[in-house]
Amino acid sequence: MKIKKLLLVIITLSTLWITLIGFWLDGKETLSQNQIIYAFYLSAIAGLLPTLLFFMFKNKAIWKNILLSLLALLLWRITYFPIMVLAGYLATLGESLALTLFDMSVVYPFLLLSVALMNALSLLVAATVLFLVFLLFRSGEKNNRIINKWSSLSLISISIPLAVLAIGVSFTQPADWHAIPDTTYLDDKPLPAASLPEINPYSTALDKQGLSWQHKVLFKSAEITYDLIPNNTQWSQVVKGTLESEFVKTKVISTAFCTKVHLRAFMTAQPYLNGKKSINNL
């Protein structure tokens, strides 16, 4: 019971913490690379830590907890970009909802909470699979009942394809094979000019010959989410248009590049959040 209460406190404080950080980011006229990167990192920690502690309390063996910690770190690296994209998309839905209900844009609370939640769910699934693997090497009727209860075969059969897709999207070029998922800090170029969307560039990109399966998955996912972004927004439209502009000007597309331009688009769109600037002037 004490462990459950501790986890509940951690989850509650983490949720409140990243929500407040989100509103703080919303209120800033400009964002620096460090501010937005640290916000992403802290949100990931807020999602991973309670889930990791939950499984650590279940597994008393030190070597198992070390393995769980390494799994959490590896999972964070693999899912960083897919979660960034999905969280960005959910933030566009949040902005649209906030505008409809309150006539104001709310972006980063939705974005950061989405990052935390998806990291938590990813680790929950991955750690559960690892937990089932541990049980497979132990005999006994009780363990067999647990394995059947968790429907391990179904869980593993779903998890493996998702893991393959996440790895493929996160590592599309040799430039993506680095330990840190975000190398934006190495880029000191000026931010791109804010733009509004015109066409779906990912549809055109899919027509190119010789695409790897990783690029096909990346472009198809981007094509779908691009068209689903709500139109009654300012921040979302600038992010969408700026990403389009950066994408069509680049010949070699890597996940590292996509990560970089997403963050740069977020920073470019910041003055348009809550009407600090108007998209009517673009």
Image: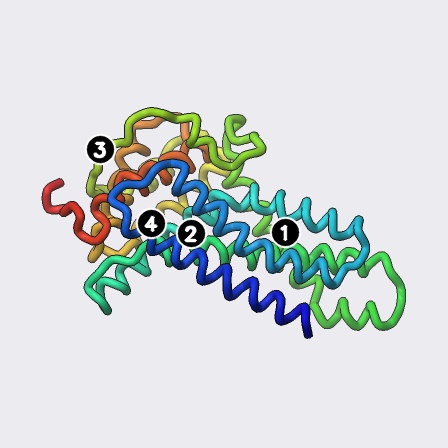
Classed neighbour count for the residue bearing mark 1: other residues with Cα under 10 Å, few (<14), some (14–19), many (≥20) = few
Q: Position of residue 52 (x, y in %)?
A: 64, 56
Identify the image quadrant of residue 121: bottom right
Classed neighbour count for the residue bearing mark 3: other residues with Cα under 10 Å, few (<14), some (14–19), many (≥20) = some
Contact? badges 4 and 3 (CB < 8 Å):
no
Which residue is at a point 72% across and 55% down the rendered structure image? 130
**Residue 74 numbered mark, or none:** none
User: In the image, is 50 to the left or to the right of 65?
Assistant: left
Which residue is at a point 71% across and 58% down the rendered structure image? 56
What amino acid is labelled 3 in the image? Answer: Ala
Q: How far apart are marks 3 and 1 (CA)?
A: 40 Å
| Relative to 196, residue 6 above or below | below
Q: Where is residue 163 in the image (x, y as percent from the top left)?
A: 59, 48
Residue under label 1, please give it.
160
Q: Is residue 76 visible?
A: yes
Identify the mark nearer the N-term, 3 or 1: 1
Residue under label 4, please give it.
25
Picture colour scheme: rainbow
Q: Nearer the viewer, mark 1 or mark 4?
A: 4
SS at badge 2: helix
Q: Nearer the viewer, mark 2 or mark 3?
A: 3
Residue under label 3, please give it.
193
Q: How many labels does the image show?
A: 4
Identify the mark nearer the N-term, 2 or 4: 4
Quadrant in the picture for the N terminus: bottom right
Identify the mark nearer the N-term, 1 or 4: 4
Residue at the left extreme, as displayed: 281
What amino acid is labelled 2 in the image? Answer: Leu
Residue at the bottom extreme, as displayed: 1
